[in-house]
Structure formats: C-alpha cells, structure tokens
Image (tube, rainbow, N blue to C red):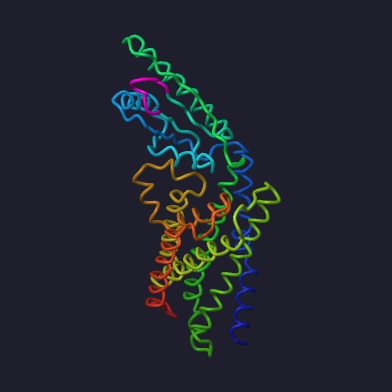
Amino acid sequence: MKTFLYQLWIEYKLYFRSPGALLWSFLFPIITISGLGVHFGDEKPISVAIGWVDEDNSIASQSLKQYLFQQAKEFKVEEGKKEDFNEKIKNHKKTAYIFVPQGYEKEQKKLQLIYNPYQIQSMMYISLLLDKVVAEYSLAQNKAGIRITEYQKQALSVNEKKSYLDFLVPGVLSLQVMSYCLWGIGFVMLSYREKGNLKRIAVTPVKKSTYILSQIVHRYSIIVLQSAFIIAFAYWAFNVKIRGDIFSLWIALSLGMFTFMAIGFFIASLVPNIELCIGINNLLFLLMLGLSGIFFSTDNLPNFLQGFSQFLPLTHLADMVRGIYTEGKSVFHFGYGMLALLIYFVVAFAGSVYFFKWTSR
C-alpha cells in the first residue's frame, strides 16, 4: 500500500509540473464552451433537419411530399411517427415536422407545420422556404382545377426552454473524457517507454499490477476533477444545469472514462512508437469529433454516416451524458449505449494485457 501511494504521488507531481497538460485539461474545454456559447447565443437551433409524418399515405400526399422536398433541397427529410417527433421537439432534438392528417386527399387538403417555438431562427428559415414552396404548389393545383392545399403552423408546447449550450456542454464533457484518455494515457505511456522509464520501473519491486492501478486511479481522479470543473463553470457562466441525477451522470462518465482509458492503453501497447500513436490518436479524435454529435446533432448527417456513428464509443457516451444532463433521464435508460461501451472496454482491456510491454520493441 505504501508503494502504491508513493507511486500515485509521483504521478500527480509529474502531471502538475506540465503546463501543457494543465492547459489542455482545464482551459481547452472552457475556451470551447465560451467561444461557441458567445457565438451561438441562446436561441441557435440544435438541428434544422425537418420531419415528415404522413397519416393519409395517399397518392396526393406522396405527390405533395415529392414536390415539397424536390424544391426544398436544403433540408434533410426524416420520416417517422407523430408521437416520436413530438417527443423530440419537446426535448429540443428537432425543430419542426410537417404533418399530413388522414383525409388529406379526399376531404381537407390541409397540412400543418408543427414546430418548437424556442428555436426561432431556424423556424424563420424553414417557414420562409415552405411558405414559398407550398404557395407554388397550391397555385399549380388551382390551375389544374384541384382544391388548393391549406397550410397551417402550430407551435408545440415544450418542457422548458433550452439553448444550444444545453446541447454543447455535455458534448464537450464527453469529448474531454475521450481526449484526455487517448493523449494522457497512450501518448504518455509510449513516451515513458521510449525514455526508458518503464524499463527502470520493471526492475524495481513495483509490480505491474501496482503500477497500472496507480495509473488508472491517478488518471481517473484527474478526469473526475476536470469534469467537475467543466460542470461548475458551465453553471456559473451560462446557467447550464444538470436536470438528471448526479449518480447517473457519475456512472455514465465513469463508464466512458474506463472505456477510453482501456482504448488508450491498447493503443500504447500495440503501436511501436510515438509518431504512430500521434497519427492514430489524431485520426480517432477527428473522426469522433465530427461524427459523434459533439457540437451538432447527428440528425444532420447523411443516413450512412448516422449508421456509422453508432459504432463510435464517443457517440454512445455523448448520448448518455446529454440525456442525463439535459433531459433528466436515468443512466439505465441507455442500456444499448452502456452495453456498447462495456464491449469496447472488455476488448480494449484484453488487448492491452496481451500486447503490453515494459520496453520498446
């Protein structure tokens, strides 16, 4: 126990002696939140993708859909059920959807645009475009002797007002967990190995298990401290609150931390040098940064990229943290995400144990 505590103390001293590590760990997420928060403000939309609900499912409604979205190519159309879209709008995951009720073809010729009243700027864009397209479609119908389509707008009552920062902060929190584990473990471990630090430790009475345990505890405690700092700053500076319970958030973040720690150890154990580690870490970082819904909703991605994003561990971590943070859900609501992270952890940890070496190859 004495050896473990001494080794842990050494790791803390080495960490706090590095200004670069402190800058990346604590100032980078704060700069990111501040910059994007000031730029986007309170009412910038999370997603401008538009939904389509067709309860009539007739030739006329399909003709309407084809015309509308041939003319309005700026939007990505997502088909679904009314109840699902209402839930997404209430939780600020969707800006609006077009609803075609039963009887559209034979009786009413009416459709509605159901929207989130708090996402004003995106709604202005959607509304202007659809006003124009529906007017053109109605004029064409009238000339053909067909009853024109009536177009109504209806604001949906939402749970509570949320801003882009409510979406951003959980994403940055998840991103920071990933980046610290990839760079703070993979890169540092390879650096220790190439400098001979691990070789010198290997000939001391320190056991491999003791050394690895001290590394895990040290880095876990640093990430917890970082996370608490980000959460406190977001609340103090922008009044972004945690709507779920702290226990669920802690479980989600801890699972993400251990998963990415295992991935970091796996990369450090597998690759032979720092240069290759930098390349792999940059590739993973940029890939997940762009496709895991950190800064913007994955709803705006093409369908094939949305499917691919579900294979990325950061996507599941960000979804869990965001669901707990902004929607008040329990961590156990995200069974599939928890299972995905556990699989990544087991595979990466097993690979780390198999490939780990004290010395360079």
- Residue 92's quadrant in the figure? top right
Residue furthest out toward the left: 59
Front in this rendered view, residue 319 or 186: 319
Determine whether, in the image, residue 345 is placed left or right of residue 90.
left
Mark count = 0
- Residues shaded magenta: 101-110
Compared to residue 27, the image places residue 203 above or below, namely below
Residue 109 inside the magenta-drawn segment: yes
Determine whether, in the image, residue 52 is placed left or right of residue 15.
left
Expressed as whole percent of the image width and height from the top left, the position of residue 71 reads 37, 24
Determine whether, in the image, residue 296 is placed left or right of residue 28.
left
- For the C terminus, the quadrant is bottom left
Residue at 40% x, 26% y: name it. 72
- Residue 173's quadrant in the figure? bottom right
Residue at 40% x, 66% y: name it. 343
Residue at 71% x, 51% y: name it. 236
Expressed as whole percent of the image width and height from the top left, the position of residue 112 reads 46, 26
Expressed as whole percent of the image width and height from the top left, the position of residue 202 reads 49, 85
Residue 248 inside the magenta-drawn segment: no
